[in-house]
Amino acid sequence: GGTKVDENFYKLLDDIFGQDFMEQYRREYPSEWLKMRASFDFKKRTSAPVVNVPIDYNFNNSHKTMKKSNINQSVQSSEWGKRGVSFSNGFLKLTKEVMEKLFAPVVAKIVQHLENLLAIESLINIEYFFLVGGFSESPILQKAIKERFSPQICVLVPEEASLAVMKGAVMFGHRPFSITERISPKTFGIQCSCEYDAKKTQWWGLAVGWD
């Protein structure tokens, strides 16, 4: 989920600054690129009206050298510049509407998947959704799920939802019996047998047993 939103953000950068420039920047300044990625990953989980992504020195300097223009010119001349992306005081600014566009295809697939699950007979009486994992902290995702499934289903987001998986693993490691039941769509088979067919199986390959 969240990684797909990140990919949409990287595509936005390619659209604004050019794929060739972004590939060169990622290759030559990996530490700055990781800093930009981490900043977006953290801020996409907030409800701020504008998300500010820092543009560091080497990005700015390389852009001037390669593109022969400043960052603000590239942003304003791009299609995203007309949709709510701007540059000011060293930050690439993404409005709430831009963030919703980055989230839209990902959120739509998640909602559709939940609808498909609820169509299964054994799941029709589900009363609660617990949203866990880093992506669950996104207000955009929470809003979409609540608008679609509430009030029929109560949507809950526990505190520190991003740490739920890690905490569960630690808890299970210390107290294996704290998890009393698991439901898995598939299991690991340790033995199998086929229905006996006299035409296909010789008598010396036959094993007879009783339950």
Image: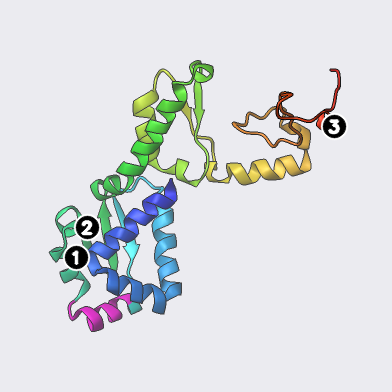
- The image shows residue 197 at horizontal and vertical percentages of 71, 24
Task: Say left or right for 110 vs 59.
Answer: right
Residue 85, disc: 2
Query: Which residue occupies the extreme bottom position in the image?
Result: 65
Q: Which residue shows up at 33% across the image and 45% down it? A: 103
The quadrant of the picture occupied by the C terminus is: top right
Residue 195, disc: none
| Quarter of the image where one finds residue 184 | top right
- Which residue carries the number 3 mark? 204
Question: Where is 139 relative to 71, above or below?
Answer: above
Which amino acid type corresponds to the residue marked 2 in the rendered image? Val
Pointer 2: residues within 10 angstroms few (<14), some, or many (20+)? Answer: many
Which numbered disc flags the more N-terminal residue, 2 or 1?
1
| Quarter of the image where one finds residue 1 | top left
Question: Where is 132 relative to 98, above or below?
Answer: above
Question: Where is 184 relative to 61, above or below?
Answer: above
Q: Which residue shows up at 49% across the image and 28% down it? A: 129
> Which of the two discs, 3 and 2, sits closer to the camera?
3
Distance of mark 3 from mark 2, alpha carbons?
75 Å
Which amino acid type corresponds to the residue marked 1 in the rendered image? Val
SS for callout 3: helix
SS for callout 2: strand
